[in-house]
Image (tube, rainbow, N blue to C red):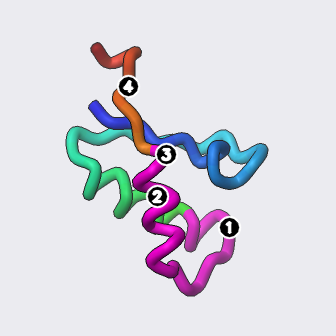
Amino acid sequence: MRLFECGTLVPGCPWHTRAAEDAEVVRRSVEHLRSAHGEEIIRENMVDNIKARIRDDAAAA
């Protein structure tokens, strides 16, 4: 499983997501940024920042 924790990008945000594929993690994360943080435009560098923070989920191993 792959893991993204929003707090690594938006300090103080406790939201996180897990999925088997990075693409699904990115999709869910972009959806979260829109709904929870009011981001209307998701630029390519934001997607790159999300991808850079995705890691293997040791708890799922």
Q: If the image is split into quadrants, where does the N terminus sit?
A: top left
Gap in angstroms between the C-alphas marked 2 and 1: 11 Å
**Residue at mark 1:** 37
User: In the depicted view, which residue is nearer to us: 54 or 59?
Assistant: 54
Which mark is drawn over residue 12?
A: none
Which mark is drawn over residue 29?
A: 2
User: In the depicted view, which residue is nearer to us: 32 or 11?
Assistant: 11
Labels 2 and 1: the sequence-earlier one: 2
Which mark is drawn over residue 57?
A: 4
Asked if residue 37 is among those painted magenta in the image, a careful observer would answer: yes
Label 2 sits on what residue type? Answer: Ser
Rendering coords of residue 47 (x, y %)? 44, 67
Instruction: Tell me if residue 29 comes above or below residue 42 in the rendering.
Output: above
- Where disc 2 sits, the SS reads helix
- Where disc 3 sits, the SS reads helix
Gap in angstroms between the C-alphas marked 3 and 2: 11 Å
Residues in magenta, as a range: 33-53
Please name the residue shown 66% across and 44% down the image.
7
Label 4 sits on what residue type? Answer: Asp
Q: Is the magenta stretch mostly helix, strand or loop?
A: helix
Label 3 sits on what residue type? Answer: Arg
Labels 3 and 2: the sequence-earlier one: 2
Question: Nearer the observer, disc 1 or disc 3?
Answer: 3
Label 1 sits on what residue type? Answer: His
Gap in angstroms between the C-alphas marked 1 and 4: 24 Å
Which mark is drawn over residue 53?
A: 3
Labels 1 and 3: the sequence-earlier one: 1
Gap in angstroms between the C-alphas marked 1 and 3: 18 Å
